[in-house]
Amino acid sequence: MDKMAESLQALAIALAIIGGFFTVVSCFVPCIPYFPAKVWKGMGLLFLICCIFQGCSLLVLQSSICDDNPVIQYLQEANPVILETLNDPAKCTRAPGFNFGIAATVFWFVAGIIPLVVPAPSYDVTEEDRVSSPAVAAEPDVEATKPKPEEETPAE
């Protein structure tokens, strides 16, 4: 196996770890009352990195996995009958899995652009929410710490 094939395998593993983790994290974002905008934009950048990794994995057609595959060579020697069942074992072609890889690249790109364009999710917490939710009740009341404007009395 050449260096390109090894690099593609490493990118695929990194893609699964990074993409999987931040996909799960993004599912829990609506549950968090305040989500920092920097983290939101950082997730967008990481999704764009996943897009790049997924796109690089499409280079498999130019690696030794397609050009000089040891499994195909083994099948030629050990059991040529199985090799005959393959369409064209000497040549890699775009199969449905490759087309799904192209679609995944597009979806990672869209998932990366959305956090960069759309502001981080947030919602207003009312006093009723503070009383009913123990997690929100533990947060400091920002409105209570703001100085209140002095009321002016009408002059007579």
Image (cartoon, rainbow, N blue to C red):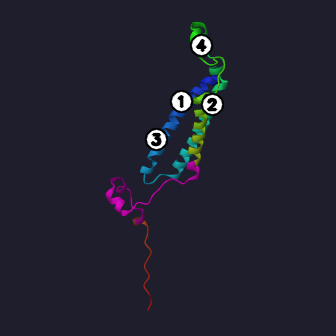
* Circle 2 SS class: helix
* Circle 3 SS class: helix
Identify residue for label 1.
13
Mark toward the start of the polypeptide (1 vs 2): 1
Above or below residue 42? Residue 70 is: above
**Residue 41: percent from left, percent from top:** 55, 48
Identify residue for label 3.
24
Identify residue for label 2.
58
- Residue appearing at x 57%, y 49% in the figure: 114
**Residue 30: percent from left, percent from top:** 44, 50
* Circle 1 SS class: helix
Q: Quadrant of the C terminus?
A: bottom left
Gap between marks 4 and 1, in whole Å? 29 Å
| Disc 4 residue type (three-letter) | Leu
Mark toward the start of the polypeptide (3 vs 1): 1
Taking the magenta stretch, the answer to whether it contains residue 125 is: yes
Residue 139 in the figure: left or right of residue 57: left
Above or below residue 86? Residue 142 is: below
* Circle 4 SS class: helix
Closer to the observer: label 4 or label 3? 4
Gap between marks 2 and 4, in whole Å? 24 Å
